Amino acid sequence: AQKITQTQPGMFVQEKEAVTLDCTYDTSDPSYGLFWYKQPSSGEMIFLIYQGSYDQQNATEGRYSLNFQKARKSANLVISASQLGDSAMYFCAMRPSGGGNYQLIWGAGTKLIIKP
Amino acid sequence: NAGVMQNPRHLVRRRGQEARLRCSPMKGHSHVYWYRQLPEEGLKFMVYLQKENIIDESGMPKERFSAEFPKEGPSILRIQQVVRGDSAAYFCASSPILKLTGAGEQYFGPGTRLTVT
């Protein structure tokens, strides 16, 4: 079964600290993509970062990096030097290559609150 | 180049009424996907459409829900005889091509928040 698990329903982090949001996935597809999205209180879905299953390097985008451990089937999001504006829901999602390679399968999300 | 547009942003319907949600994909995009987000949950795939064709509706409830993407105009997600359990955020995404590789090829709209009273 294709599944994304985010085990942290909520996190409080002090401003300027780094934060790691956990994501584990389950798929038997040999090829897949992993995504992280941010959903602020305004509700829109903002793409943050992508990791392909065959990518050799961990993805980075500014303050975001993805700690991809393929053998453990984990794709944790690391946010360095957190800011108050990082407070939001964060979703991990997977796009398996099977089934047409277009469906995104989503985790339940982690609510991140940055404390001043 | 405008992004994916959804309207209305908020919609309130009484039980038994119909809800129509509209999605205008990005310019040049001919593939549209609808997702539903129930409160406190992640998104769930509903349907994938190309112009004038439903490609995959495996995530759509069998009754009361329908979707279309006509040759001209926006994609419409229609919910007939709404019930309280239909209250959710409905997101539309669009892409320019079928075979998605890499990131950034499925662009999300701002969502429509449906409340059924």
Image (spheres, coloured by chain):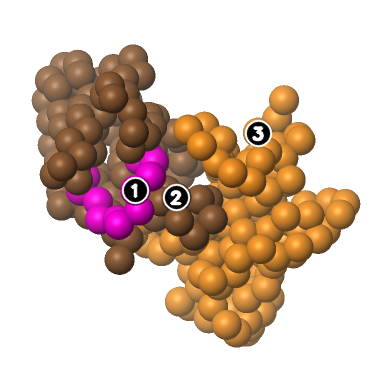
- In the rendered structure, the answer to whether residue A49 lies left or right of residue B76 reads left
Residue A112 percent location from the top left of the image: 22, 38
Which three-letter amino acid code belongs to the residue tagged 2?
A: Ser
Q: Numbered disc 3: what chain?
A: B
Q: Is residue B20 visible?
A: no
For image coordinates 59% across by 44% down, the residue present is B99
Badge 1 vs badge 2, beta-carbon distance below 8 Å: yes
Residue A21 percent location from the top left of the image: 19, 38
Which three-letter amino acid code belongs to the residue tagged 1?
A: Pro
Which three-letter amino acid code belongs to the residue tagged 3?
A: Gly
Residue designated by label 1 = A30
What shade does chain B have? orange
Which residues fall within the magenta stretch?
A21-35
What shade does chain A have? brown
Q: Secondary structure at mark 1?
A: loop
Residue B63 percent location from the top left of the image: 60, 84
Residue designated by label 3 = B3
Q: What is the spatial separation of the Cα atoms under label 3 and label 2, in whole angstroms?
A: 26 Å
Of residue A108 and residue A23, the one placed in the foreground of this image is A23
Q: What is the spatial separation of the Cα atoms under label 1 and label 2, in whole angstroms?
A: 8 Å
Q: Nearer the viewer, mark 3 or mark 2?
A: 2
Q: Is residue A25 visible?
A: yes
For image coordinates 60% across by 54% down, the residue present is B33
Q: What is the spatial separation of the Cα atoms under label 1 and label 3, in whole angstroms?
A: 32 Å
- Residue that lies at the very extreme toward the right in this rendered image: B72
Quarter holding residue B51 = bottom right
